[in-house]
Image: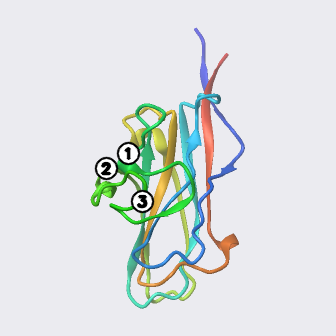
Amino acid sequence: MATLSANYTAAASLTITLTSLADGAYRQSAEVTNAANLYLDAHLGGSIQAGTVGADGSIIIYGYGSYDATNHSGGVGTTDAGITWGTTGNTSIFGYRQLVLLAAIQTDSTDDDNDLYWGPVSVASAFGGVLPTKWGIVVLNNTGAALHATGTNNEVQFMGIKYDSA
């Protein structure tokens, strides 16, 4: 009988500009295409630096996927860009309701550094157990302040997962 074991790829950066993301603002990542790699899942995580916040808040990370390799949940696009729901691309005013929740990160007003490490999060499990052919994330900053102005303090990475048979 064959034995299956997980095969993790090296971490790869997800393209998303979180530098100085304003409070209340949404940002979508560039899409990740899984058509060639055929990963069964991807573990997603990273670090976000919120800086000094005046009250407890949160950073919400949503996932988007494509059901037909062309159109994406919420009407989001394929590139790293800000989102204004109802005016960006094909988004509706409530397009964020069509995204899947991946992570909710709490910020603390008593910590003036707020280095927020999160993950790993299984992307496939958020989409019913199957990694979409094309997928990405949307980040909502609800901290009460803009995210850190130095881009290297904010990163998102993923590791593709396949299974080997021996």
Where 161 falls versus 138 (above or below)? Answer: above
Q: CA distance from mark 1 to mark 2?
A: 6 Å
Q: Earlier in the sequence, mark 3 or mark 1?
A: 1
| Residue of label 3 | 88
Label 1: few (<14), some or many (≥20) within 10 Å?
Answer: many
Mark 3 vs mark 1: in front: 3
Mark 2 vs mark 3: in front: 3
Label 2: few (<14), some or many (≥20) within 10 Å?
Answer: some
- The answer to whether 101 appears left or right of 7 in the picture is left
Q: Residue at x 54, y 78 (%)?
A: 147
Provide residue 7's location: percent of width, then percent of height.
Answer: 66, 32
For the residue pair 77 and 135, the one nearer the viewer reads as: 77
In the drawing, what numbered circle is on residue 95?
Answer: none
The image quadrant where one finds the N terminus is top right
| Residue of label 1 | 73
Q: Earlier in the sequence, mark 2 or mark 3?
A: 3
| Residue of label 2 | 98
Instruction: Determine whether label 3 and label 1 are within 8 Å by CB.
Output: no
